[in-house]
Image: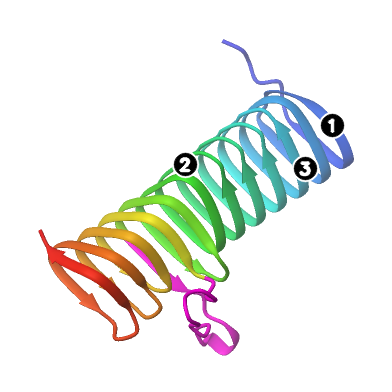
Amino acid sequence: MEKRIGDLKINGQSSAAGGKYNAVIINGEGKIEGDLDCINFKINGKCDINGNVKAESVNVNGTNSIKGNLEAEKVKINGTADINGNLSVEKAETYGHINIEGDCNAEVFNIEGTFAIEGLLNAGELKLSLYGSSRAREIGGAKISVNRMSGLFGLKTIILPFGRNKGLNVDIIEGDDIYLENTRAKIVRGNNIELGPGCVIELVEYKENFKQDEKAEVVTHTKI
């Protein structure tokens, strides 16, 4: 088994090879060539990784780019993150913007800001507080909530006609308990579904309960 080779610290602007480390700390601008395996990974500034990342905890304050997959127990991002592969995590929090070209799997995922996920976003508990346009191909989970982010003085952002709003665009949403605002979807399917203002849904399929705000639009809804 390959042993960990201590800590990797970059202060200022520098590059380093990938490998197995205890802690990786970037203060400034760093570039890592190759796969990275560490216990703690912290970025204060900017870091580009040409490979996959595996860590127990990831903390980003700034900008992070990963050319492969990210696998971690805990991820917290304050800023922006671009992941060219998949994200697999136990618990994730993002404040800003996250872009994932593959799939995202999490036990708990809280997003405050915006996101773009080209594949599937799947989480046991998913809480999305959106400020700006966001998209995913498909969303699944046990408990899903999509809310407009609070604006000045705690007031929610104004809902505009959907062509101009900055909400969520997704093909399919499927879960047990679902609450949505400012969401456009082809299909929403679940046990208990509540649609808040600003939603435009083509088809709703529910097993137990369905509630629709007067400012939500639904083409067809059916109990299954």
Q: CA distance from mark 1 to mark 2?
A: 26 Å
Q: CA distance from mark 3 to mark 1?
A: 10 Å
As drawn, is 130 to the left or to the right of 139? right
User: Which stretch appears magenta?
Assistant: 144-166
The residue identified by callout 3 is 26
Instruction: Identify the residue shown where x is 81% and y is 28%.
Output: 16
Could you tell me residue 155's position as x and y percent?
A: 51, 87
- Observer-nearest residue: 36 or 85? 85
Q: Are there few (<14), some (14-19), or many (20+) residues within 10 Å of tag 2? A: many
In the picture, the quarter occupied by the C terminus is bottom left
Q: Secondary structure at mark 1?
A: strand
Instruction: Identify the residue shown where x is 53% and y is 82%.
Output: 157
Q: Secondary structure at mark 2?
A: strand
Instruction: Identify the residue shown where x is 80% and y is 35%.
Output: 31
The residue identified by callout 1 is 15
Q: Are there few (<14), some (14-19), or many (20+) residues within 10 Å of tag 3? A: many
The residue identified by callout 2 is 89
